[in-house]
Amino acid sequence: MMTKLSKSTSLSYALAVAAGLAASTVSSHAQGALATISEVTGIGGNFDYTLILQNTGSQSLNSFWYGWTPGVFNLPSVPTSAANSSHGWVVTIAGNSIEWQNTASAPALAAGQSDMFTFDSTSSLAAITTTPSGQSVAFTTDNIQFNAGVSGQSTPVFAPTIVAVPEPSSMGLLAAGLLVLAGSFRSPAASRKAHRCPS
């Protein structure tokens, strides 16, 4: 069953994803995409995963097939569950892979935009990202095509980059450290006033 992310975990994830995407190479193809993946939790033999897909091409993307390349379902096991994307793309578990497609009410992913996809699996992060497991294709057409790297239809095959999510406790320690540091930069006048003894 999918679990909701806490605000601190979501913030941590957003920071980690931004760093991961900034470190990635952007495709120069008319259709291009890059993705990051992170394990959010691992409870009771199930792992919760979050994928961020970024459209790096010049054409809008309308569908995304994770763990699939032409003729091959790449994931080591059938995902136990998956959710619609943050933009509302509808999910379908297709064998050992997952398809997400836009609908009339769920917009295409325009050039430069990103979308978030979540799913659960009994397979570890290493198992679902080691080639060929994580290899995927995104499509410019409304319907899933059965090809890769075809101009006007699909991106070249790509695989997500693993991004570590900082633990919420680490973010709390960082915030506390920043507050202490900020307090140490008070003006000398403020420090003298704070330490002045009453007369």
Image (cartoon, helix red, strand yellow):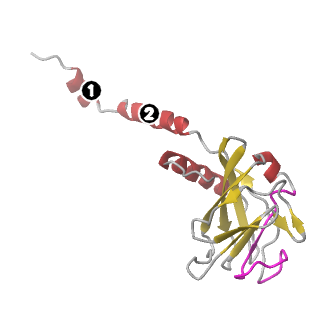
Helix, strand or loop at mark 2 = helix
Is 62 on the left or on the right of 158, as rendered? left
Residue 26 is at least partly visible in this image? no
**Magenta segment includes 99:** no
Q: Residue furthest left?
A: 199
Circles 1 and 2, Cβ within 8 Å, touching? The answer is no
- Could you give the CA–CA distance between mark 1 and mark 2, rounded to whole angstroms? 20 Å
Q: Position of residue 115 (x, y in %)?
A: 61, 66
Q: Which residue position is annotated with label 1?
A: 191
Mark count: 2
The residue sitting at 53% across, 35% down in the picture is 169
**Residue at 73% in and 81% down:** 143
The span picked out in magenta is 132-152
Which residue position holds label 2?
176
Give the prevailing secondary structure in the magenta stretch: loop
In the rendered structure, does residue 137 fall within the stretch colored magenta?
yes
Q: Residue drawn at (57%, 70%), measured in percent from left and top?
A: 87
